[in-house]
Image: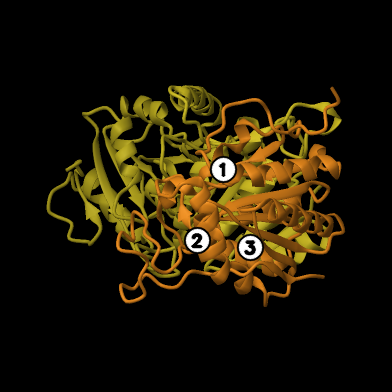
């Protein structure tokens, strides 16, 4: 029988750390497929964050750098400046990028560092067990917002990262995508391909945000988690391109 | 023959690093090390090398982490409060086995302190300021020629052990001008097959990482790292001794303070007082054994530091119990004065400890308490 689909050879047959229904697998798949299709795997340095995807080094057949929590954009700056011939992909979650690493992402973007950040927004700290993230929606219940994220309780507003970075001069490409439906997975892949091409052309900083389900920490069934993205996240985090070269 | 040039300390360290093959420098403004960052901005960029004024000291040390991962000779510099911010990054450099050079032009603390000279970061430098069990070689130059030579050496030491190395200066060293000679450098090559740059040409993927959740792995790494630390102790220890063979009292001091103490030793010797000096050049590794040997022949020791008494704990650890240790310290930006140090020598060797010294910062027969 003719094989018409297989997983990327960059994704090794090793134990996966992700929970059932998690979106990271879809995002990894897109990244691996693109690196393979675009012939970038052999000069790629993959920057793994502190978060659920920290163990990416154990199952991706790529050079991997694993920096401190939130400092991925700074470390990626170091890698890319030291070796401009490498293709650098940063993979960051919302706690890593939009809380502890806010300064680093803003300034790497503003300097126009020529790497691509895949920003996985699942509105919660996953690895540590479901605490409130900077992207947690108002009213959303987490371990550290048990009654729901509340403005009156001083928990602040959910941060829209694409909109925040939009004004910065060094940013070449910004898009927000989702992986909650097959159609959106295809769109996410297209956006990441564009971002990768921008890095290859040396045009500066590119970031693709991906709304991604975390059913375990959202305390929802996988199907309900997909609906949560459609009904709750997308109205606050609109999809689309925010900046193009 | 290399030329003698008159330069400021901060610039000497910058020039030495450039000559040592530094390709990536990351800094952030803080007094009293600003001339170093400014020197790098001018000269690294002119040479087509990487200079970034980072958004913070934290970002700068993590840029070092990335650049070193990719095989570059990388450095960052700062002063005490900024070095505190870099401690997490230094721990990660050790954990991921990354070579790097960090320069601390120490100023007065704690807190924001002041911009005057100090040695109050001794504990932070030699006992592990960041989390986890770790060690790193710490060079404490005492003049600008030594600052130049040790900065060059720091890069090789970092590469040889795949471990960060600290150059521990101070505000006087950073700000003063002296003639220096930049000696010819014998460039060594180091194995860089572990670095990141893409698994091109079919090599297996490389990993720069300090994490493992598997049982026993991190414990094993620590035991392997210990072998490096033991090797550093054996091979990288540097210290200077002066008139220790016949001394009745030996001063122990490092860096700028040792320089002041050398003037005191000269004055004492001119008056027929048998005073010697031990100057650790690496404050880690520390010359425990050498001090112990010297302590078997000499009973009186005087530790002088620009702090409340930090290295003195290592001196106490090194010396035989019978040795008496006196201390003179100036914390928070104060500088020890020759006369205050000499007063102690006079008290111990001439007055046989009769009477009392009321000078602030002087402690006769200092004891761990």
Q: Chain of mark 1?
A: A
Seen at 39% across and 30% down, the residue is B288
Q: Which mark is residue A131?
A: none
Q: Which residue is mark 1?
A: A53
How far apart are the alpha carbons under marks 3 and 1?
38 Å
Place residue A235 in its image quadrant: bottom right
Does residue B10 appear in this view? yes
Question: Quick check: A96 above or below B189?
Answer: below
Which chain is depicted orange?
A
Q: Which residue is mark 2?
A: B79
How far apart are the alpha carbons under marks 1 and 2?
35 Å
Q: How is the image coloured?
A: by chain
Q: Chain of mark 2?
A: B
Depth check: give the residue in front, A210 or B300: A210
Comparing labels 3 and 1, the label whose residue is closer to the camera: 1
Q: Residues within 10 Å of mark 1 (few under 14, many from 20)?
A: many
Q: Chain of mark 3?
A: B
Depth check: give the residue in front, B184 or B45: B45
- Badge 1 marks a residue whose secondary structure is helix
Q: Position of residue B155 (x, y in %)?
A: 66, 41
Do marks 1 and 2 share a subunit? no
Q: Position of residue B81 (x, y in %)?
A: 44, 62
Are the residues at dot 1 and dot 2 in contact (C-beta closer than 8 Å)?
Answer: no
Comparing labels 1 and 2, the label whose residue is closer to the camera: 1
- Badge 3 marks a residue whose secondary structure is helix
Depth check: give the residue in front, A116 or B3: A116
Q: Position of residue B327 (x, y in %)?
A: 27, 49
Q: Which residue is mark 3?
A: B36
Do marks 3 and 2 share a subunit? yes
Seen at 83% across and 48% down, the residue is A85
- Badge 2 marks a residue whose secondary structure is loop
Q: Colour of chain B?
A: yellow
């Amino acid at each position: 029988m003719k094989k018409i689909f297989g997983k990327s050879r960059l994704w090794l047959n090793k134990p996966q750390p992700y929970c059932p229904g998690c979106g990271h697998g879809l995002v990894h798949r897109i990244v691996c497929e693109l690196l393979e299709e675009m012939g970038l795997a052999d000069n790629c340095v993959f920057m793994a964050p502190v978060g659920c995807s920290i163990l990416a080094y154990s199952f991706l057949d790529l050079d991997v750098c694993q920096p401190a929590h939130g400092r991925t954009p700074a470390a990626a700056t170091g890698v890319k400046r030291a070796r401009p011939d490498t293709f650098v992909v940063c993979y960051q979650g919302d706690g890593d990028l939009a809380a502890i690493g806010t300064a680093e992402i803003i300034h790497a973007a503003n300097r126009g560092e020529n790497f691509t950040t895949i920003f996985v927004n699942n509105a919660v700290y996953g690895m540590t067990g479901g605490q409130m993230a900077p992207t947690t929606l108002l009213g959303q219940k987490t371990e550290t917002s048990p009654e729901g994220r509340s403005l009156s309780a001083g928990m602040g507003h959910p941060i829209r990262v694409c909109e925040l970075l939009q004004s910065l001069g060094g940013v070449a490409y910004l898009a927000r995508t989702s992986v909650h439906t097959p159609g959106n997975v295809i769109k996410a892949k297209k956006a990441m391909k564009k971002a990768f091409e921008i890095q290859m052309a040396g045009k500066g900083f590119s970031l693709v945000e991906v709304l991604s389900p975390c059913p375990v920490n959202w305390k929802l069934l996988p199907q309900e988690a997909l609906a949560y993205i459609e009904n709750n996240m997308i109205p606050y985090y609109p999809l689309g391109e925010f900046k193009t070269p | 023959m290399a030329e003698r040039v008159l330069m400021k300390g901060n610039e000497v360290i910058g020039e030495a690093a450039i000559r040592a093959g530094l390709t990536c420098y990351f800094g952030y403004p803080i007094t009293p090390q600003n001339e170093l960052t400014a020197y790098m901005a001018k000269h690294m960029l002119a040479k087509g090398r990487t200079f970034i004024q980072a958004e913070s000291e934290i970002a700068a040390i993590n840029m070092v982490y990335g650049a070193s991962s990719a095989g570059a000779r990388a450095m960052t510099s700062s002063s005490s409060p900024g070095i505190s911010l870099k401690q997490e990054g230094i721990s990660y450099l050790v954990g991921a086995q990354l070579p790097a050079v960090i320069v601390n032009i120490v100023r007065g603390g704690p807190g924001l302190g002041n911009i005057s000279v100090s040695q109050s970061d001794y504990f932070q430098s030699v006992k592990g300021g960041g989390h986890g069990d770790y060690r790193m070689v710490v060079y404490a130059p005492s003049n600008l020629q030594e600052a130049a030579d040790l900065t060059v050496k720091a890069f090789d030491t970092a590469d040889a052990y795949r471990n960060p190395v600290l150059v521990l200066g101070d505000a006087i060293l950073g700000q003063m001008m002296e003639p220096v000679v930049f000696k010819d450098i014998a460039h060594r090559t180091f194995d860089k097959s572990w670095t990141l740059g893409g698994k091109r040409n079919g090599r297996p993927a490389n990993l720069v990482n300090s994490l493992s959740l598997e049982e026993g792995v991190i414990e094993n790494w620590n035991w392997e790292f210990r072998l490096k630390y033991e090797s550093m102790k054996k091979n990288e220890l540097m210290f200077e001794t002066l008139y220790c063979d016949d001394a009745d009292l030996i001063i122990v001091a490092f860096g700028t303070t040792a320089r002041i103490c050398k003037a005191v030793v000269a004055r004492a010797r001119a008056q027929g007082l048998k005073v010697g000096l031990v100057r650790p050049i690496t404050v880690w590794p520390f010359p425990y054994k050498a001090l112990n040997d010297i302590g078997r022949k000499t009973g009186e020791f005087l530790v002088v530091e620009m702090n409340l008494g930090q290295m003195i704990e290592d001196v106490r650890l090194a010396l035989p119990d019978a040795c008496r240790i006196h201390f003179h310290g100036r914390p928070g930006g104060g500088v020890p004065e020759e006369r205050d140090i000499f007063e102690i020598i006079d008290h111990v060797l001439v007055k046989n400890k009769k009477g009392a010294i009321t000078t602030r910062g002087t402690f006769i027969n200092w004891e761990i308490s």
